[in-house]
Amino acid sequence: MLFYLTCWTEDDGIYSCGHEHLTIREALECLVPDGKSFIRARDNGRLRSLNDAEFGVFLVEVTGGILKGKS
Ligand SMILES: [Zn+2]
């Protein structure tokens, strides 16, 4: 199974939202746009960074959200 979760860094380590989001869009709902949050994939139980295709989706979702917020 492939899930996405939102992670962020604190002074004492890395935290995650603990959810099992099925899409990057869902994971973005947990993301706080403070520059410390990022999304990782959990792929068959292993955490990994987003691949290029997933990062492309992430950018589109983030940009779309910002544009919507400004209009
Ligand atoms: Zn979450």
Image (spheres, grey):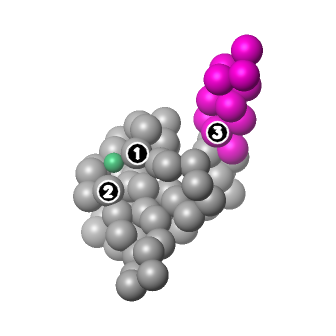
Q: Which tag, 2 or 1, sits closer to the chain's start? A: 2
Q: Secondary structure at mark 1?
A: loop
Q: Quadrant of residue 36?
A: bottom right
Q: Secondary structure at mark 3?
A: helix
Q: Secondary structure at mark 2?
A: loop
According to the picture, the residue beneath numbered tag 2 turns out to be 17
Is residue 46 placed above or below 17 in the rendered structure? below
Residue 59 in sight in this render = yes
Residue contact between numbered discs 3 and 2, judged by CB atoms under 8 Å: no
Image coords of residue 23 (percent x, y): 43, 40
According to the picture, the residue beneath numbered tag 1 turns out to be 30
Amino acid at pointer 1: Cys
The image shows a total of numbered marks equal to 3
Residue 50 in sight in this render = no
Is the N terminus in the top left, top right, bottom left or bottom right quadrant?
bottom left
Amino acid at pointer 2: Cys
- The residue sitting at 68% across, 31% down in the picture is 66
Furthest-bottom residue in view?
Answer: 12
Which mark is on residue 62?
3
Left or right: 7 as drawn, with respect to 34: left
Left or right: 9 as drawn, with respect to 60: left
Q: Is mark 1 within 8 Å of ligand 1?
A: yes
- The residue sitting at 40% across, 82% down in the picture is 13
Q: Main secondary structure of the magenta part?
A: helix
Left or right: 38 as drawn, with respect to 46: right
Residue contact between numbered discs 2 and 1, judged by CB atoms under 8 Å: yes
Amino acid at pointer 3: Val
Q: Quadrant of residue 35?
A: bottom right
Q: Magenta stretch?
A: 59-71
Specify whether residue 5 is painted magenta: no
